[in-house]
Image (cartoon, rainbow, N blue to C red):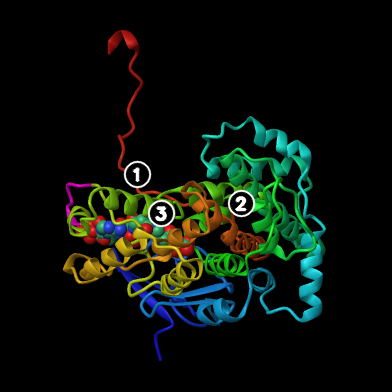
Amino acid sequence: MSDNKVVLNYDGNSFEYPIVDSTIGDRGIDISKLRDQTGLITLDLGYKNTGATLSDITYLDGDNGELYYRGYPIEQIAEKSNFSEVMYLLLHGELPTQDQFLKFEGGIKKYNYVADEMKKILDVFPRSAHPMGVLSSLTSALTAFNPKAVNVNSKEEMDEAAEMLLAKFSHLCAWTYRKKLGLSINHGDNNLNYVENFYKMCFRRPNMDFELDPVVVGALDKLLILHADHEQNCSTSTVRMVGSAHTGLFASVSAGISALWGPLHGGANQAVIEMLEMIEQDGGDVAKYVEKAKNKDDNFRLMGFGHRVYKNFDPRATIIKKAADDILTALGIEDKALDIAMQLERVALEDEYFVSRKLYPNVDFYSGIIYRALGIPTEMFTVMFALGRLPGWISQWKEMRLHNDPIGRPRQVYQGAQKRDYVDLSAR
Ligand code: SDX
């Protein structure tokens, strides 16, 4: 039986701090009294060893490459569920009954449109604008058209805000795609399910009949499932931090979009394809780029490799790698980038530098191969990640508010100037 407290010896005194138990995974030392009792704070750059909250939503085991949504292993969810059902599971904690699912889908379809004024905001962006910047702005602008702050303690209000955002966000994501291609926007179609509706809003051309390709819809659905939540990652922590000030849901998610945009986070899926294309254009010399990634004097990194938590393999990467193979075969596409990706993976995983640092392909390494096969432009890849992660962001924001987590306000170890007096300009 493990201890239920830790003892800290400091300045000739002993201090005890209780350990907070988990269902599975990391247990936590409760240091809420540390500063009052010792005058010390902790320092943990990047919060690599720090739990920010208690959560029931998603569990990761980084050593064994396991990922559970509300206890259900990602492999089973990816194979047997669908994205709409995963949204419900993350938001409500249980798989829905048939009636609950139909009510949930109906709640989303009720908001399957976006005010025309929002289109005017979209129109003023240049076509060259990065879709993530457009998406973050449009998501924040949703607040202007839905200013009523959600009462998180009202189940009805919280459910309605979540369903509204899920519905409208899929439009905003599709609109950024249409903007990039200079195409008119499509509105939602309530005869379709969530992923079919998104697919049609993206790909329907006004001058052609539109047909849903089940292979493409199936691949999209699986990719969105695999991105739906991932406990306290950078963008989710951003949504929680902004929401902890009781900022509205839409504005909190808008901040999360900006965090996800970063190439070390969700922006990696775009960076991976750009890296694979660069290697291809440079003659496909994979070994050269593996050496560059190892060279401390070279700021090149193997995008799509490494993870803060997964130190064995990312279970999502395993599923996506197979899906990439399947969809390229189904669509009859030869993609040099996939060949280079598989060579890169093989070379890197035999190299001591990567093995010793436990750097394996992550969720972003193969996802771009599929998005590209589906005809999605590279700059849209992180928008796809955001669409997938939205139910996770909403669920985590809702949990943070229902738990009454305090406003996030970390401390620091100050290493700046000692107190000193102002010097007039004439004396400097
Ligand atoms: C996502 O947190 C989540 O859950 C995120 C995510 C989610 O679903 O929300 O899973 C999505 O963001 C996946 C990660 C996508 N990012 C990338 O693929 C970018 C490339 N990867 C890295 O930048 C890096 O691996 C991180 C950011 C993912 C993790 O960084 P850490 O945990 O802070 O590790 P680190 O930067 O301290 O690296 C440890 C060592 C260092 O070498 P040493 O100083 O020990 O000699 O590993 C090296 C790093 O230089 N290293 C790499 C590397 N990643 C880490 N070296 C070369 N190529 C890489 N990709």
Figure check: 79 above or below 162: below
Residue labelled 2 has its Cβ within 8 Å of some atom of ligand 1? no
C-alpha distance separating marks 2 and 1: 31 Å
Is residue 291 or residue 357 the one in the foreground? 291
Whether residue 72 appears in this view of the structure is yes
Residue picked out by circle 1: 414
Is residue 158 or residue 138 the one in the foreground? 138
Label 2's element? helix
The amino acid type found where label 2 is placed reads Val
C-alpha distance separating marks 1 and 3: 32 Å
Which tag, 3 or 2, sits closer to the chain's start? 2
Residue picked out by circle 2: 253
Is residue 246 or residue 229 the one in the foreground? 229
Say the numbered circle drawn on residue 268: 3
Say the numbered circle drawn on residue 195: none
Which tag, 2 or 1, sits closer to the chain's start? 2
**Which quarter of the frame holds ligand 1?**
bottom left
Q: Is residue 247 magenta?
A: no
Q: Residues within 10 Å of mark 3 (few under 14, many from 20)?
A: many
Range covered by the magenta-colored residues: 294-298
Quarter of the rendering containing residue 95: bottom right
The amino acid type found where label 1 is placed reads Tyr
Residue at x-position 70% and y-position 59%: 197
Residue at x-position 76% and y-position 81%: 97
Q: Residues within 10 Å of mark 1 (few under 14, many from 20)?
A: few
Circle 3/circle 2 CB separation < 8 Å: no
Label 3's element? helix
Residue at x-position 36% and y-position 77%: 63
Figure check: 401 above or below 14: above
Residue labelled 3 has its Cβ within 8 Å of some atom of ligand 1? yes
The amino acid type found where label 3 is placed reads Ala
